[in-house]
Amino acid sequence: MKKVLALVLALAMMMVATGALADIVICQNKVEITAAMQDYAKLYTEKTGVDVKVITGGGSSDYNTVLKAEMQSGREPDIWVIEGPSGYELWKDKIADQTGAEWTKYTAAAYMDGEKVVGFPVAVEGYGLAYNKSILDKAGIDPATLTNFDALKAAFEKLDSMKDELGLDMVVSMVAGTTTGMTWVTGLHNFNVYLTVGNERNDTTYIDQVLEGKVDEERFHQYCQYVALLFQYSTQDMLLNGTQDSQLAAFASGKAAFYHQGNWMDPSLVVLNPDFEIAYAPHPFLHEDTDGILVNPPSWYVVNENGNKDEAIAYLNYLATSEDGADYMVNKAAMVPAFTNVTIAPSTPLSKSVMEWNAAGKTYDWQQYKLPDGFGMGTLGQIYELFAAGTIDVDTFEIMMKDAIAGIAK
Amino acid sequence: MTSKQKRKLTEFLFLVPTLLAFLMVIIIPFIYGIFYSFTDWQGTGSFSKMVGFENYKAIFNEPAFLHSFLVTLKFTVINIVTVNVVAFVISLLVTSEIRGRNVYRAGFFVPNLIGGIVLGLIWQFIFSNILPSVGAAIGWDLISKSLISNKDTVMFTMVTVNTWQYAGYIMLIYVAAIQSISKSVMEAAEVDGAKYWTRITKIQIPLMANAFTISLFLTLTNSFKMYDVNVALTNGGPVGIFMNKPVNSSELLALNIYQTAFKYNNMAQGQAKAVLFFVVLTIFSIIQVSYNKSKEVEA
């Protein structure tokens, strides 16, 4: 027992020692990319002579514990990860202003505090209406035209009329079930379509209204028609009983032409080995053209004001602007970089499409996480399911949604 | 110190570790819980103010909670009946002269060894995937759609799964009680010409009344507190309408409390519900136990 204890102590001391030796300490939360990140850190050391140490906390809750412990260890990390406003508020006093850093020129997805640039986007995730190109080709539909409600509706109608010919079970693979725990797809991701599509990133008009209990009548009415369209051209069985797996399976096996999910499904999609081309179309719920998909970084790197600030920013600049950095982000860590200058394409279809939209600068923001806890998945998710089940019609759906939103302000 | 006092002290010292553990993990959190139900605590850091009975008042204006309460009562009543009837019937079966009864005893008990979450997921697959394909194949409309996503049948699925899981456990209690009834009593009744049905209702059931007290108590509390099967099998769905508001039609109280606290991040409100839940369950259990106790007889 004593021996084990001594060993543990020795190891702990070694870790502290190496920590003290490194020029930059990074505390990050993605367990799956730890190895890739460490290799990249070694490469960086070889090229620049700057020593980099990577500390990883697994899972989001663990990560916060690890980070807090590191902060109190006397050797604060120089770079760490924040996952949104709550993380930013917590560490605000320590986070350095990176306005004007070289990497900021190549991205629209930096974490901003007013006019100040404070967070480096680790990667981006995106969603839209993924489509099966070979089915659309057979039906003679050009996906590039699906940028407004009327075009999409016409496309859905055409596909629906050719169902047997194309071997389709449904036009859109869409899920909304509480039982299967899929209400985040409707209550958060789909609802965000209302919040941001057509707007500049950082434009918070509609989320601000919602938080005050109000909606833009005309826009919201149109959004409800869009939900009705998606639900009408899916099947009730898929909407209510579809799981993440069955939703994907319907699309990957060519039984559905469209698929309402994000590029995080790529690892599962690749396993099913679809034999057709896949890319994203927008969520065009308005009659006006809205040409873009919904893209957002899940987390950001921030720099410690009191640490090796210049070294840390240099590290981030190299990550964003060098070929080594691009190779690491795309090929080694299998992420979609948030930077427009990166030209290497990911090999998986959904991520590839997200990257193309992002590089073209055609993206809309994610603001669904500004909703109160549980509101999207719980309160709104229930109403979507009622509508999917046919318990209520589209007008009642609209009334109940507005009613629920009005409840926020109380 | 007299030897008697010494003995008392020794006994007490032996109790200390258990008492300490009980105090630390049950009593203190319980008191904390009651305290937090009067605050606006959000689960992190400290609360900003005391709100008195606000959380309790809000509960009674919440359709989802009232609905959960009714659903829980309904589930509890149905479940107590089915679990006990099934358990009693199979306990009669496995205490009869039937061949291979030990295999049956083990077999009926096994579902109880599977965790509720696993069980819920397995049965979800059965109800949403296997039964519908069987239903489609044989053309039986009722089961050709998932029984779980139908508001009218979701209760049936929960009761089925819980009975399947819990009846084996209750069966053990009945088996022990039946075996403890003296053979001579049963034989005397048989010699006197009592038929099988009469022997069960007039002799066995009154003599094993204490087993009913325990079994009813266990099924009452178990059904009332049902959480794991609920979350894994139905996750509270499908959605229904109650008092003009959307509610999760199979969301039992425990799940409702969990969702309030962790999904809506409204810890103090969830805590108030939990306190109410405790009070109601205690009252029901006391009524049930005192009623059953009065029915017990000695042989």
Image (cartoon, rainbow, N blue to C red):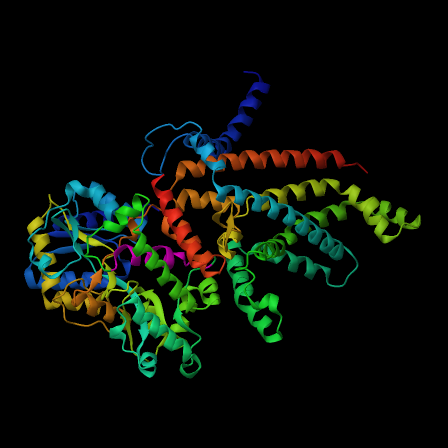
Closer to the camera, B56 or B185?
B56
Residue A132 percent location from the top left of the image = 33, 76
Closer to the camera, A116 or A19?
A116
Q: Is residue B135 visible?
A: yes
The image quarter containing residue B1 is top right
Residue drawn where x is 72% and y is 53% of the image: B91
Residue B136 percent location from the top left of the image = 58, 73
**Residue found farthest to the top:** B1
In the displayed structure, A407 sits above or below A219; it is above
Residue drawn where x is 69% and y is 60% of the image: B104
Residue A70 percent location from the top left of the image = 22, 45
Q: Look at the image and say whether residue A187 sits in the magenta stretch.
A: yes
Q: Main secondary structure of the magenta part?
A: helix
In this figure, what is the number of numbered marks? Answer: 0
Residue B190 percent location from the top left of the image = 89, 50
Q: Look at the image and say whether residue A194 sits in the magenta stretch.
A: yes
Closer to the camera, A209 or A325?
A209
The image quarter containing residue A385 is bottom left
Q: Is residue A7 visible?
A: no
Residue drawn where x is 11% and y is 61% of the image: A106
In the displayed structure, B144 sits above or below B214; it is below
Chain part drawn in magenta: A180-197
Closer to the camera, A244 or A174?
A174
Left or right side of A384 for B71: right
Q: Quadrant of the C terminus of chain A?
A: top left
